[in-house]
Image (tube, rainbow, N blue to C red):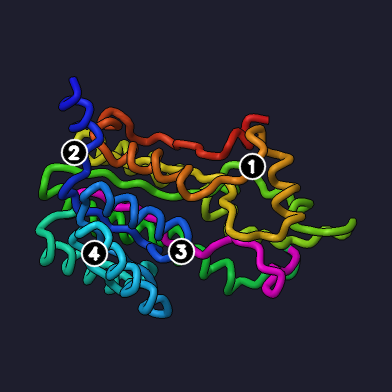
Amino acid sequence: MNNYLNNLFNLKDKTVIITGAVGISGTAHVKAFAECGANVVITDIEQQSEKIEKLKEEIEHKFGSRCLGLIVDVSKKEDVEKMVKDVIQEFGKIDILINNAGISGKFDESKIAPIFEDYPREAWDKAWDVNMTGMFLCAQAVGREMLKTGGGSIVNVASIHGLISPDQRVYNKGSEIKSVKPISYSVTKSAVYNFTRYLATYWGDKNIRVNTITPGGIFDNQDSDFVKAYEYRTPMGRMANTDDIIGPMLFLCSDAASYITGANLVVDGGLTIW
């Protein structure tokens, strides 16, 4: 029984691509898969090249994992196709894709999104290019390889604000409400669910499982007033930390979830139940 259970959760020597890998969540995913013995491919945009290399060196030293660091703009087809080619050349296969890259909807007081009436078309288009087109291109290119090798697991990262609309009162002080959580973030993240369901049915008999994970708000040194307001709205009384997301992510990628596809695993401390 012990060997059976160990094998269910075993990710050793699996090759996993993680997009948007040097952000707070991506970094946690990289370290978790490396600790589990997987071959980890760290990808992010050119502006993050130093962080990619630093993270690569850290996990190679700490976990002794085989690791590949790549600069990839997921919204560019040529970048994505080169990524897949490089991974196949290095590891020979792709077992897992974590579609984590995205334009964050994180609140930043220095870059408050304008109210909806003034929201720029360029920002809307850019969010779709990265948050959805990037996910499409990665799944398409990786899916081709998974078909050749007999299957794999794809996890698309959504957001609590793809399930529910952001409560703008949490992000504002005083009585004036500004649309500081951009509409493009909520709408693109909501599109992830049907994208997942479509691929899950399309590849259902090809042993390619496709699921969504929906994290709640993750603590990242936000303003104390925001944290207090968010925690008040959460049944568990706190924001998520990256460790809260790791377990569900590893589960969806393991054989323990071999009969799960097209699902959305919500990790939100209960926020959406009331």
Image quadrant in which the C terminus is located: top right
Image quadrant in which the N terminus is located: top left
Residue depth check, mark 3 versus mark 2: number of the one nearer the observer: 3
Distance from disc 4 to disc 1, alpha carbons, whole Å, reads 33 Å
Q: Which residue in the structure is indicated by mark 4?
A: 60
Distance from disc 4 to disc 3, alpha carbons, whole Å, reads 18 Å
Q: Which residue in the structure is indicated by mark 2?
A: 206
Of the pair 125 and 8, the residue shown nearer to us: 8
Residue at 36% from the left image edge and 78% from the top image edge = 49
Q: Which amino acid does label 4 sit on?
A: Glu
Instruction: Give the magenta range.
Output: 95-115
Residue 199 occupies quadrant: top left
Q: Which residue in the structure is indicated by mark 1?
A: 238
Residue depth check, mark 1 versus mark 3: number of the one nearer the observer: 1
Distance from disc 2 to disc 1, alpha carbons, whole Å, reads 40 Å
Residue at 63% from the left image edge and 34% from the top image edge = 236
Residue at 61% from the left image edge and 71% from the top image edge = 121
x and y percentages locating residue 123 in the rendered image: 58, 71
